[in-house]
Image (spheres, rainbow, N blue to C red):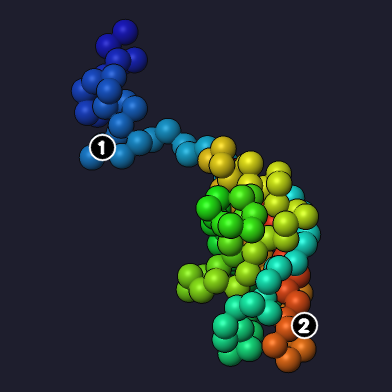
């Protein structure tokens, strides 16, 4: 019975924490689940978007942040690039479920799927993912 309780560190706690305090128990499987395709709304209202456009590439990860105090939309989700620069919003027509998921603590993010520039107007197609 002592063999079950003791390991190299000499205790049952040591069995779970391993040598040096590191866990030997495998981490849960993580994955990114595709949820929806949409576009970035409001790009024409972002100052300097023309200068930012060349630095936005297909496949780039986009971070999502809730903006519940937004005076125009309480379900607003801001979209920022990897450098933390705001590029727009998840469209109001698409944000009801995503804002609820984020409010419940779920991690959502986007990836640029398409990009088309036309002067100050830039259409950025994105895919929304849930990280689990």
The image shows residue 95, relative to residue 12, as above or below, that is below
The residue that appears at 77% across and 55% down in the rendered structure is 93
Of the pair 79 and 56, the residue shown nearer to us: 79
Give the residue displayed 48% in from the left and 39% down from the top: 27
**Image side of residue 19 versus residue 79, left or right:** left
CA separation in Å, label 2 and label 1? 51 Å
Residue 78 seen in this snapshot: yes
Q: Position of residue 89 (x, y in %)?
A: 65, 64
Q: Which mark is residue 21?
A: 1
Q: Position of residue 127 (x, y in %)?
A: 72, 61
Q: Is residue 47 above or below residue 97?
A: below
**Residue visible at 72% across and 60% down in the picture:** 91
Per the image, label 2 sits on a secondary structure element best described as strand
Q: Quadrant of residue 61?
A: bottom right
Q: Residue at x 63, y 88 (%)?
A: 50
Q: Nearer the viewer, mark 2 or mark 1?
A: 2
**Image quarter of residue 72:** bottom right
Among the two numbered marks 2 and 1 on one chain, the one whose residue lies closer to the N terminus: 1
* Callout 1 crowding tier (Cα within 10 Å): few <14, some 14–19, many ≥20: few
Residue positioned most to the top: 1
In the rendered image, which quarter contains the N terminus?
Answer: top left
Q: Quadrant of the C terminus?
A: top right
For disc 2, the marked residue is: 116
Q: Which mark is residue 125?
A: none
The count of marks equals: 2
For this rendering, which residue is in front, 34 or 117? Answer: 117
Check disc 1 and report its element: helix, strand or loop.
helix
Q: Residue 10, image x and y in percent? A: 21, 23
Let me know if residue 7 appears in the view.
no
The reply to whether callout 2 and callout 1 are in contact (CB within 8 Å) is: no
**Residue 77 location (% of width, % of height):** 61, 57
């Amino acid at each position: 019975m002592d063999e079950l309780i003791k390991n190299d560190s000499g205790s049952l706690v040591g069995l779970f924490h391993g040598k040096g305090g590191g866990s030997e128990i495998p981490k849960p499987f993580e994955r990114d689940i595709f949820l929806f395709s949409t576009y970035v709304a409001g790009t024409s209202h972002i100052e300097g978007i023309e200068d930012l456009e060349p630095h936005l590439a297909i496949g780039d990860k986009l971070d999502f942040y809730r903006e519940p105090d937004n005076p125009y939309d309480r379900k607003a989700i801001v979209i920022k690039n990897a450098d933390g620069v705001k590029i727009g919003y998840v469209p109001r027509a698409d944000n009801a479920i995503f804002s609820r998921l984020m409010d419940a603590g779920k991690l959502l993010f986007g990836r640029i799927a398409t990009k088309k520039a036309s002067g100050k107007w830039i259409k950025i197609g994105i895919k929304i993912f849930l990280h689990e």
